[in-house]
């Protein structure tokens, strides 16, 4: 049966309430419309708009229906961002360790300028990465221990914001660590005879930067979607 105007409008209203998550909006809209069509299957005039309106009234307010999905959607949003950030931190750490091992394997010792820079750069790099690791771990543990309430409330919105704030701090610390490593690697390359072997540390830095940028994009998108969700539900 083709959707009539009331059912189509009802589905569109649900989708508007959930537009912070396009895939969720499409899924809930489709499910609601399917349920309404099933409810109308036994009607003598299933295509009549009045019959559709009656079925919609029995189904409930579209805003209330949509809001029931928001807490779990926000929980999924925060957990996905935290897991991706944790994986990025692991990947960046692996690239760092591999680059140091490669320097040893190639017997590429630091020069005088690099040794001087390392006295400041290496502790700063380790501190920044340690901060990134701690905040990423805190975000992961925090979001995995939160439980979505049956109905969205302000306190739960603050919990999700807190998780995303931890992710933001982790991303900022990652950028500091990668910037420090880039400077130290640049000094190493300047002091040495650059050849094709220099591509290895360069590629590892590119990989680290890509992971950090991907993490930043994920956290930024999560923050934006959370803000939109809270605005739509009147919690912001």
Image: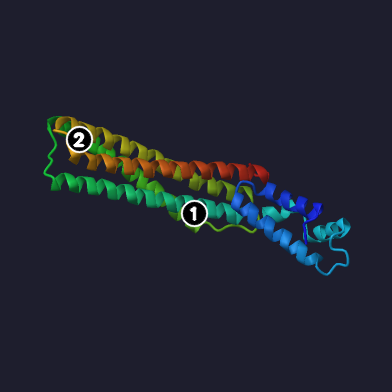
The number of numbered discs placed on residues in the rendered structure image is: 2
* Residue drawn where x is 32% and y is 45% of the image: 130
Please give the residue where the numbered disc 2 appears in the rendered image: 118
As rendered, which of 34 and 158 lies closer to the eye? 34
Q: Nearer the viewer, residue 197 or 121?
A: 197
Q: Position of residue 2 (x, y in %)?
A: 77, 58
Q: Which colour scheme is used?
A: rainbow
Residue 193 falls left or right of residue 211? left
Against 15, is 120 above or below?
Answer: above
- Give the quarter of the image for residue 178: top left
Residue drawn at x 80%, y 67% as measured from the top left: 41
Quick check: 118 above or below 50? Answer: above
Quarter of the figure that contains the N terminus:
bottom right
Of the numbered discs 2 and 1, the one sitting upstream in the chain is 1
**Tag 2–tag 1 contact (CB < 8 Å):** no
Q: Residue at x 49, y 54 (%)?
A: 79
Report the side of 177 relative to 34 (left or right): left
- Res. 100 mark: none
Question: Between marks 2 and 1, how big is the CA–CA gap?
Answer: 37 Å
Reading the image, the residue beneath label 1 is: 79
Q: Is residue 154 above or below residue 43?
A: above
Q: Residues within 10 Å of mark 1 (few under 14, many from 20)?
A: many
Residue 102 on image: x %, y %: 18, 47
Residue 221 picture location, percent across and down: 52, 43
Q: Residue farthest to the front?
A: 2
Question: Between residues 137 and 218, which one lies in front from this camera angle?
Answer: 218
Horizontal arrangement in the rendering, residue 97 relative to residue 78 (left or right): left
Q: How many neighbours does mark 2 have within 10 angstroms: few (below 14), some (14-19), or many (20 or more)?
A: some
Q: Position of residue 175 (x, y in %)?
A: 36, 38
Secondary structure type for disc 1: helix
């Amino acid at each position: 049966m083709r959707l009539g105007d009331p059912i189509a409008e009802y589905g569109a209203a649900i989708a508007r309430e959930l537009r912070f998550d396009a895939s969720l909006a499409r899924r809930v809209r489709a499910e609601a419309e399917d349920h309404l069509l099933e409810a109308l299957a036994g009607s003598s005039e299933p295509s009549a708009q009045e019959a559709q309106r009656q079925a919609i009234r029995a189904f409930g307010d579209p805003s209330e229906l949509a809001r029931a999905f928001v807490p779990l959607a926000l929980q999924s949003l925060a957990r996905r961002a935290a897991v991706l950030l944790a994986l990025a931190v692991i990947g960046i750490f692996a690239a760092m360790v591999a680059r140091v091992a490669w320097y040893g394997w190639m017997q590429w010792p630091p020069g005088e300028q690099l040794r001087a820079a390392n006295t400041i750069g290496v502790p700063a790099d380790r501190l920044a990465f340690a901060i990134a690791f701690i905040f990423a771990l805190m975000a992961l543990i925090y979001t995995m221990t939160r439980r979505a309430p049956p109905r969205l409330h302000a306190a739960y919105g603050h919990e999700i914001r807190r998780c995303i704030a931890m992710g933001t701090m982790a991303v900022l610390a990652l950028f500091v660590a990668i910037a420090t490593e880039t400077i130290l690697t640049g000094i190493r390359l300047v002091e040495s005879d650059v050849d094709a072997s220099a591509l290895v540390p360069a590629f590892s830095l590119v990989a680290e930067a890509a992971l950090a940028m991907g993490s930043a994009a994920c956290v930024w998108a999560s923050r934006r979607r959370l803000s939109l969700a809270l605005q739509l539900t009147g919690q912001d």
